[in-house]
Amino acid sequence: MSPSPPYVEPPLTGPADVPSDLLARPVPGPLVRHPVPLDERLIDPDVARTLRRLIRAGHQAYLVGGCVRDLLLGRRPKDFDVGTSARPEEVRAVFRASRIIGRRFRLVHVLFAGGKIIEVATFRRNPNTSDGDGDTDEEMIIRSDNVYGTVDEDALRRDFTINALFYDIERREILDFASGMRDIERRMVRTINDPRVRFREDPVRILRAIKFAAKLDLGLDPEVVDAIIQARDSLPLAAKMRLFEEVLRLLRDGAGRRAIFLAWELGVLHVLLPELAALLDDVGGDDGAPARVFRLLAEMDARTLERGEPFDDAVLWTLLMLEPALEACQGAGDRLGALMAFLEPIHDRLAAHRRIIDSVRRIVAMLPKLWAGHVGKATRSDIFAEALMVAEISLAARGEVAASQQLRQHIQRNRRPAPGDDVRTR
């Protein structure tokens, strides 16, 4: 029998039940303005123009959230978010080339040349949850936050302090309502207000905390760790499709190995993917199943960073669940039947897309022939490219270099052309 991981028992750091007086909306802390002149060469010029036009029109407008965090951590943001005090109709009045989208909460798309879109959002706040007296996990989950607010309310509705930083491009200052700059300097993921409350309000924040720690190479604040352990059993209360999407997000940024390790270490994997967690709990040395899983994820991460973009979700999900899937059908007379029996509970638990579950089943069934180098009729399959990628990555993770390189050459020869490739090569 394998030993229990050290994280299974909740730490004795406080009561599991959160006092009802903690359910009040977050109270703004003192605003601190940090003079931090960010390198404007890293800021999209059209985003800068959008901010300045809103400011000249008399509105508050800032870079908000993840893009500010990334710039402070020395990373080039993939996306830029603009937050403003202007209501959608007021934004629309500033930019003729714009359109209002959304029904539940309206945003403005500001249009630039080449079909480029800058998304502008009005400041929001959380709905007041203090009116009710329910304190069960299910009653505490926030279902909507579509309420306009002020800049401080918008900052404090966010989940983590490092995501609650606003950049004033004119004054070249960071607006900090939640000591987020301190956590940037500490390289720490910390929630705004009590993490026990924040994770019970929305259990998916647990996965987001893990994602940020893994993706940005940050630590988890000790109180966040304790709260995750206390709240992890609330994860099934969240919408299943959100859980499935957040697990995939753990794998897309080239930090899947660390993310899955953290999820396992914190006991989160035991709630969401007990099939994989049970495999990782076994002690098997360098050649055991846990080592194989993490070598596979490390190879997946390396390829993701090399490509500069994530793999298809079917490839990611197959790589994540490959070892337990192979174990499930080992020695089975009906391998396909055994695979489906293994995958169905995962589909039910996380509302995994049927297309992805079916693709995983078909890819795993194709792997033995691909590993042996027998491509043959497999090329006719509509998931041949995905299966070939999984086969090649798994061989590389095993250290079978020659076989891996042979399949990699096959991938390059049969690469699907990107849209327009055929035109550019004429």
Image (cartoon, rainbow, N blue to C red):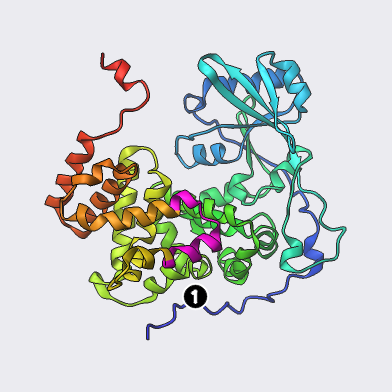
Q: Residue, x 45% and y 67% (percent of image)? A: 264
Where does the image place residue 283, in percent across and percent down from the top left?
32, 77
Image location (x, y in percent) of residue 44: 52, 24
Residue 176 part of the magenta-drawn span: no
| Residue located farthest toward the right when viewing the structure as drawn | 131
Q: Quadrant of residue 195?
A: bottom right
The quarter in which the C terminus is drawn is top left
The overriding secondary structure of the stretch rendered in magenta is: helix
Q: Is residue 173 above or below residue 190?
A: above
> Which amino acid type corresponds to the residue marked 1 in the rendered image?
Tyr
Q: Secondary structure at mark 1?
A: loop
In this rendering, position of residue 177 left or right of residue 327? right
Q: Does 329 appear above or below 356?
A: below
| Residue at figure coordinates x 44%, y 81% from the top left | 4
Give the labeled residue for mark 1.
Answer: 7
For image coordinates 54% across by 37% down, the residue present is 67
Q: Is residue 346 magenta?
A: yes
Horizontal placement of 412 versus 203: left or right? left
Please rate how many residues cluster around mark 1, counting C-alpha atoms within 10 Å: few if below 14, some from 14 to 19, many from 20.
some
What residue occupies the far left of the structure in this picture?
402
Whether residue 217 is visible to the viewer of this picture, yes or no, is: no
Tell me which segment is drawn in magenta. Answer: 341-356
Residue 313 visible: yes
Q: Is residue 140 above or below residue 92?
A: below
Q: What percent of the width, then of the height, locates residue 409?
A: 17, 40
Nearest the viewer among 217 and 395 is 395
- Residue drawn where x is 72% and y is 43% of the image: 31
